[in-house]
Amino acid sequence: MTAVPPPAPGRELANPPSDGISNLRFSNHSDHLLVSSWDKSVRLYDASANALRGEFMHGGPVLDCCFHDDSSGFSASADNTVRRLVFSSNKEDILGRHDAPVRCVEYSYAAGQLITGSWDKTLKCWDPRGASGQDRTLVGTYPQPERVYSLSLVGNRLVVATAGRHVNVYDLRNMSQPEQRRESSLKYQTRCVRCYPNGTGYALSSVEGRVAMEFFDLSEASQAKKYAFKCHRKSEAGRDIVYPVNAIAFHPVYGTFATGGCDGYVNVWDGNNKKRLYQYSKYPTSIAALSFSRDGRLLAVASSYTFEEGEKPHEPDAIYVRSVNEIEVKPKPKVYPNPPA
């Protein structure tokens, strides 16, 4: 019997969330996928087996989630709580609270700490190994210039993107003040920030169909390498229609990256050579989140309307897991003309 090739968008996971998908992430240890949603749930899937392995309900919409290890994770909720989720027992406990919805959560393996960012304009660091009780798990609270919209980590570096186009860069070993205070080089609201896997900088996307490629090193030579490019746009009747770029995900092997926009497209880019490598066929609605598996063989895509045009009829929220072909993500070698004989 010949195997039937998977449909173009990838394999759709059974038992998806019943409302907007806020984020999804692959584990660093397996093909487990953690998914947070506005339906107040965090779901744990085995993406390879297409099986729902666990579900955790919260007191409000869940705006972000991340893994701790393969047996537990963390979530950030609009009910102002930060929760730890234990998969084996299907139990969760409250690690701590912010004074407003918690927008982002990241676990640092380097520091052994959980970092959360909130619309209360603070960043908090937590030690999940601390005894129970908020006083003993909270390591520090760090005021931000505005509401936190996106966080990303690489090694000991933390990048915080807030409302008002602020970007703060921290060294996790000294959180007393940012190592760098920056302003986004894009003119419009930041949607997503993701650090380069090699630790030299970060990509930042905006609501206005653009991505900026930035570098940490402040030397003139490094700063000369930064650039921005337009994406997730189309021309209609001579007018440019521009879509928010909601998601950025770096390929763990090749360092190329995928972007997802409200146009329903996922594009793959080679940032070093400033080229688009691939565009996947269009998804049913906005791309809300993207994640590559730890070996880069799978790409999880959240096709989920993000209400950029307000309340309107829209396609159901869905998670697609697609097998990644090397040709889609591997940088193409530069072709040099033959030197004269």
Image: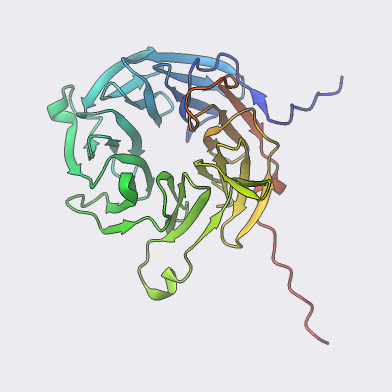
| Position in image of residue 9 (x %, y %) | 68, 30
| Position in image of residue 30 (x %, y %) | 52, 30
Q: Residue furthest bottom?
A: 341
Is 227 displayed left or right of 12 in the figure?
left
Quick check: 292 above or below 87? below
| Position in image of residue 82 (x %, y %) | 28, 26
Count of number-bearing discs: 0
Q: Residue furthest right?
A: 1
Model colouring: rainbow
Is 112 displayed left or right of 285 in the figure?
left
Q: Residue at x 42, y 69 (%)?
A: 223
The image quadrant where one finds the C terminus is bottom right
Residue 26 in sight in this render: no
Is 314 displayed left or right of 20 in the figure?
right
Quick check: 24 above or below 250? above
Q: Residue furthest front?
A: 237
The image quadrant where one finds the N terminus is top right
Viewer-proximal residue among 217 and 136: 217
| Position in image of residue 163 (x %, y %) | 32, 44
